[in-house]
Image (cartoon, rainbow, N blue to C red):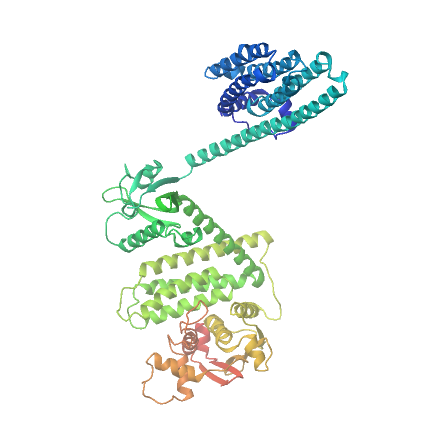
Amino acid sequence: MAQQQSKLPRLNFWHLLKGFGGNLEVEFYGDFFRTSLPVVRIAIILGFVLYSLFGILDIWIVPVHHEQVWLIRYAIVCPLLITAFILTFRSIFVRIMQNLMTGISLVAGVGIVVMIAITFDSELGFRFYYAGLMLVLIWIYTLVRLRFTHATAVGWLITISYEIVTIFFNKLLATPDGTILFVNNNFFFLSANVLGMFASFTIEWYMRKNFLLRLEIQKAYNLNQKYLENIKEGLLLIDENHQVLPQYSKYLSSLFELKTLEGLAFAELIYPGRGETDTERQELEHFLKFLFHNKSADLDMIMDLNPFKNKKITIKTGEYVTKEITVNADFIRIFGGANVEYLMIIFEDMTEIVKYEKELQGQKTRYQQEVESVTAILKSGPAIFKDFIAESSLTLNNIRANVANLGAPGVLDQVFREVHSLKGSAKHLDLNFISTIAHSIEDILYQAKNDSAGGPIAVDRIEELIIDLFHEFQNLAAMIDRLKEFSGSDVEVGRLEWKGQLGEFLRSLPPMVESLAKELKKSAHLEIENSLEEFPHLPKLKNPLIHLLRNSIDHGIEDQFERLSKNKAGIGKITLRLRGDAAAFYIEVEDDGNGIDFVRIQAKALEKNLVPSGQAELPKAKLLQLIFTPNFSSKNVVSEISGRGYGLDIVKDATDQLKGKISVNTKPAKGTKIRLTIPRLPAIEEKS
């Protein structure tokens, strides 16, 4: 099928009358001829055999005129059939088949009509030759493979010739018996023509339909070939011994950087050499054995076990040079009888796709971060973010200066406090991407702190993450500038009851509390009671206050179902109070949650070897001291919110620096109140 139509016609009745037209009809006839030729040859042989064998009956049914009948049979029709059969092996037959077979069919049918015309009414052939005529009609409509129009024309011409002969030559309508015979024969002729037309129509209809379908399949195949030629995909076959057969896509040679793959063990192709990949090699060989010998496994099971889903493979491109590619592979079992004879493996190089997906994911993450930042700035106002950038940049510089000296006494704890505070501040401002980076630094520090073997600290990785944080601060600052440019002035939002840095900070806390509670699948509401206009120690106590609020939500407030079971309101209440007098500032964080679980604290203290295992239950005052020590947490699971044990340590450290005091009042199932008392010492305020 050389021609490929851009759009193929939809088959209809007129195509059988007029053809497809143009080159498509020429192509169809070529296909029609190739498909029909074997059938036509058989039809000619059958026609010759039957037409000639019926000559034996002529002696009996037309004894007077059998010689004239034989002349028609053996001198005209049979030679024509022999000639046609010979021509089927000549190239000319493709051009003359329809016309030649139409002519022979007409001669064969009219020949029997002539036989009827020359016989006497006393001869049996006069009455029974019409049966032979019906055989000819069946032969024309079904076996000779004439086009529907040609077959219909020949069939009705033969029938009309019969009508002429029986009416004008045989005078069948002249007698009652002849009329009955005429009606009887015509009933069968008309029926044979109608049924024959339907058969001929159906044959050509389906031949044309199959032709169009094959064209469509060919188009799809050609399209698939172009697709396979242009995508990074390779195909190979392996036998039961897992050896690569010669039938493999040449693309695989470039993919694996090998001149030939033939004869290689498949596992050796994927995992050359021995060493780190031995376990993976064994898993692959087990999977191949499973495919060959577990014939009952369905496709879903195979796909679940498939080890080649975005599989990273290291390819050796030189003696000391390697490259890493990512591939997918589909495994198709080829059966020979009841056994799996071969495995067809189709590789797809996903390296570039994975690379682009990562880049796209990075762009998507960056977009989400920008949206997150803009939303946070619009919600709380740019001033608090400017303060965050300034304060966090100083903190990062301190961290960076101490990273190289983490092994010195107290430095690791100090760095951890600073990172944890930075993370809490970012979380409080809904800058989750910054808190995530800070959490990654915490992971490294936490691992170093708990590494009993004293292994090396991943200082280089910490440095990389610090650089990432500085980049994020720069992006955040640029975003604030763009928003200012866009609006023409600083964006101001929120309530105006509190002014200055303290007001901005306090306004940012309720949304933080609600967001964090939602993240923990709880409900909590923050009430703020503030009688201060200014608070000179705010820069030092911002992060400690955030940690106290986070601690209340995470450790104090219960989930809604637990609260309702205790006849509490479903929404937890946290109160932040700020007041002062001539001597000191007083900050209280109170919640109506569970209260402090001293039994759990005692158990954790024993677990961390903070108290001797044989010691009796510690007094509550001693246990309260423990919760403010570094690396102490009652949580079993570390998350971005809690579990490191540095939240309350940060609170204590900041309070100590300000020469303040901490008091804790807690009641089981009623809640906890933590008060910070910060003295008004002029020297400290001046320093702040």
Query: In the image, residue 485 lies at what x, y percent?
Result: 57, 52
Q: How many marks?
A: 0
Q: Where is residue 319 in the image (x, y as percent from the top left)?
A: 22, 43
- Looking at the image, is 491 positioned above or below residue 86? below
* Near-viewer residue (265 or 602): 265
User: From the viewer's perspective, is residue 213 above or below residue 386?
Assistant: above
What is the quadrant of residue 134 in the picture?
Answer: top right
Q: Residue 72 at x, y = what percent?
A: 57, 11
Viewer-proximal residue, 34 or 512? 34
Residue 422 in view (yes/no): yes
Q: Which residue is drawn at 56% across and 59% down?
A: 375
Q: In this view, does 157 lie to the left or right of 559?
A: right
Image quarter where the C terminus lies is bottom left
Q: For residue 68, which quarter of the picture?
A: top right
Q: Can residue 502 be seen in this view?
A: no
Considering only vertical position in the picture, is 444 above or below 195? below
Residue at the (33%, 65%) spot, across then down: 402
Q: Which residue is at a point 35% across and 64% down the rendered structure image?
A: 444
**In-front residue for pair 501/685:** 501
The quadrant where residue 227 appears: top left
Residue found at x 54% / y 55%: 371
The picture places residue 294, in percent across and down from the top left corner, at 36, 52
